[in-house]
Image: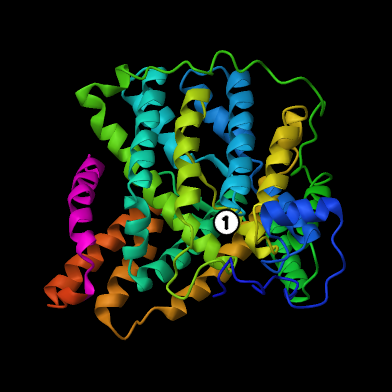
Amino acid sequence: MPHPDVPGAASAAGATADAPQPPASPSGALLERLFRVRERGSTPRTEALAGVSMFVAAAYAAVVVPGQLAKAGIPLGAATTAVLIAIALATLCMGLFANLPFVVAPGLGGVALLAVTIVGQDGVPWDAALGMVLWSGVAFLLLTALGIRDLITRMMPLNLKYAISGGLGLYIALIGFRDSGLVIAKPDSAALAVGDLSRPAGLLALGGLVVLTALATRKVPGAFLLTMALVTVVGIPLGVTELPDHLFGLPASPGPAVFHIDVLGALKPEYFPYIFAFFVSEFFSMTGTLLAVAGRAGLTDEHGNLPGVRRPFYVDSGAVIGGAALGAPSMTAYLESSAGADSGARTGLASAWAALGFAALLLVTPFATLIPSAATAPVLMYVGLTMLGALRNVDFKDPTDAVPAALTVATTLFFGNFGTGIAVGLAAHVLVKAVAGRFREIPWGLWIVLIPLGYYFSTLVP
């Protein structure tokens, strides 16, 4: 895969840095200094389209996350404004500081852990729960500053990095099938079943998948946006797209959510397992999403590593701390960023466009409800299914490589948590290689990682 700092990195449009280029305008020169768009083989137009694709694919967070936080007692209006501010700022920082195409927003797993489990079931005050998230971010920041996070990333075996991409792909595809109603969970068990295929939402999603595949095959620019727009419009007469009563309005005050955080109260000894759960899950989710999506964009090297990975880790750490202070917990790189990568995003300029979209939602918040899940589902299904191609690089002839890789993919789906899937894969790699007597293939640092992983697994036991 091409190095992101090497001129001539491939882009979706096939542009190369050594092709004749017209003189840059002052604004173009500024963009090049900030984002190195041409150097990475992209164009401002491609980055803009990709950024809008990322924004549209992830816009549901503006509705889903505040709804979950409201269950924890945070006022809905304040939560919505706080979440939009946090997403816009964190995504912009990812673009300007790390120069990478990612949307950074509250992770649904972490939000559910806070709202449903910690506050809803266990009765912990929500301001203390936000404090737990903040302390997990402090731990992220310390490990990043010490170089431990990027060390662990480099120590990840190459076969697991390929499995991470495949597991992420299946997980993304499952979200798309689930959001469109094509796949449902049986009410009497956790098993998945085929949904009602006669429902308009499912049929629209399947039709959108066919259209998107055709457009992508023909390399039509903005294929994701065109597909989502088409499904949204067609969904209006079918009752799938619900038109809001109004589109414009001033945002609610974020005051009831901002800085309502109990930093010291979160340090009670009985809360430590919660902090650790936030830490481990988001650590591996962020790492896996970063590597998988960056690889999708052609930004990783031949070893599956992302050069300069400490920069996005700093952004992630700061986003977790700042997001908790604002009332937007568990900020992380979003899986939907892969929509940008597949649209040709190679730089942080795409993140800047996505951040602008979330900032604009502050004035048109009802617009986020206009885009139905049936419109974003085809994008998630297409991107997820095509990411399975990374699994062909795993050496399935070697059981010590195949089993940990397969466990990474399988447990991601079984547990419904991408971070847990990676944790299982790492633990399996160490144990399987050790039992097989192939100790030289186990990086020394992974033996140390087993200790916190063992504790993390113990917290998953009811």
Residue 368 in the image: above or below residue 66: below
Q: Amino acid at mark 1?
A: Phe
Q: In the rendered image, which quarter is residue 91 located in?
A: top right
Q: Which residues are magenta?
A: 441-462
Name the colour scheme: rainbow
Q: Nearer the viewer, residue 357 or 425?
A: 357
Residue at 59% x, 41% y is 93
Camera-side residue of 224 and 346:
346
Judged from the image, the secondary structure of the residue bearing numbered disc 1 is: helix
Look at the image and tell me whether residue 189 can be seen.
no
Q: Main secondary structure of the magenta part?
A: helix
Asked whether, in this view, residue 412 is left or right of residue 363, the answer is: left
Which is more toward the observer, 217 or 372?
217
Check residue 432 for magenta coloring.
no
Which percent across, then down, holds residue 119?
Answer: 38, 23
Expressed as whole percent of the image width and height from the top left, the position of residue 118 reads 35, 27
Q: Residues within 10 Å of mark 1 (few under 14, many from 20)?
A: many
**Quadrant (top left/top right/bottom left/bottom right) for the C terminus:** top left
Residue at 73% over, 43% down: 371
Q: Is the N terminus in the top left, top right, bottom left or bottom right quadrant? A: bottom right
List x then y, in percent, for residue 215.
77, 70
Q: Which of these two is toward me, 444 or 235?
A: 444
Q: Which residue is mark 1?
A: 177
Q: Quadrant of residue 249?
A: top right
Residue 124 in the figure: left or right of residue 178: left
